Amino acid sequence: MRTVSAARNRSALVIVGLLALAAGAWIVIASTGAAADLPGWGSVLAEPGSTPAELATAHRAWALPVGIALALIAAILGLVLVIAQVPASPRASVFRISAPEGTDLGGIEPGVLARALAERAEGLTGVQDVGVQVLGAASAPLVRADATVSEDAELAWVTAALRTRLAEDCAVSLGRAPDRLDLLIHLRGRARHEQRVDVAPAA
């Protein structure tokens, strides 16, 4: 997943485009002899038919330092852009919690909420271990849970209880039940069985 925002990428492209435009304008003006019509620019712009060697000799006082500086800047910018494109896990956003009238009550990190939901779900009879992820936004949360239950547990009851517990606890924490709740059940015993239950609690 790309971690550089589209705005930053566009900004980099605009800067490169402006530099290319400036270089192109310099070449066009130099090659057409338009420098004579630009007072004060005759010493900077090249004469038509000038070779690179002649240009380097004519502007050796400033061309080499400027060229070195531009090369270093381009190398640094290129390195920064390359490093920024390396995929990384995006930073988890904080769920903002608001009162019904719109007052901001604070925020909670998704990882903290996920651990709290898991600990509460593990208190149910027959549930041995629960892993929870909370995704999306506070206004439209998505809960993914992976639960391991004992083999002798009543699967239908445990599934319903987990669904209810997770949905209610999420609603208490964020003020809204999850738009979707994905639940994967593992039965722990001699033979390992799995049952996936995808549910979407009503708003």
Image (tube, rainbow, N blue to C red):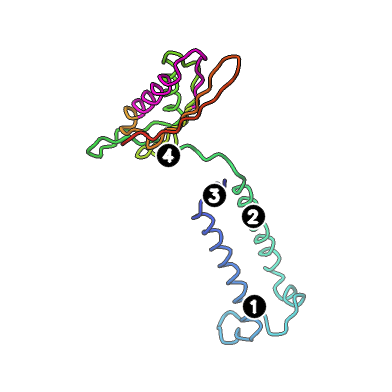
163 drawn magenta: yes
Q: Which mark is first along the chain, 1 or 4?
A: 1
- What amino acid type is highlighted by mark number 2? Gly
- Identify the residue position indicated by label 1 in the image: 27
> Mark 4 against mark 1, which lies toward the viewer?
4
Residue topped by disc 2: 78
Upstream in sequence: badge 1 or badge 2: 1
Position of residue 137 in the picture relative to residue 195 (left or right): left
The kind of residue tagged 3 is Val
Q: Is residue 60 above or below residue 96?
A: below
Q: Which residue lies under the disc numbered 3?
A: 4
Q: Is 166 included in the stretch rendered in magenta?
A: yes
Q: Which structural element holds mark 4?
A: strand
Identity, as a three-letter code, of the amino acid under mark 1:
Ile
Q: Which callout, 2 or 4, points to the residue nearer the camera?
A: 4
Q: Are marks 2 and 4 in contact (CB under 8 Å)?
A: no
Among the 4 quarters of the image, the one containing residue 159: top left
Q: In the image, what residue type sits under mark 4?
A: Gly
* Residue depth check, mark 1 versus mark 2: number of the one nearer the observer: 2
Check the image and name the residue furthest to the left. Answer: 101
Relative side of 111 to 27, left or right: left
The numbered mark at residue 136 is 4
For disc 1, the neighbor class at 10 Å (few under 14, some 14 to 19, many from 20) is: some
| Residue 203: quarter of image | top left
Determine the residue positioned at 64% across, 81% down. 30
Q: CA distance from mark 4 to mark 1?
A: 52 Å
SS at circle 3: loop
Label 2 to label 4: alpha-carbon separation: 33 Å
Q: Nearer the viewer, residue 69 or 1?
A: 1
Q: Position of residue 32 (x, y in %)?
A: 64, 86
The mark that comes first in sequence, 3 or 2, is: 3
Q: Which residues make up the magenta segment? A: 146-170
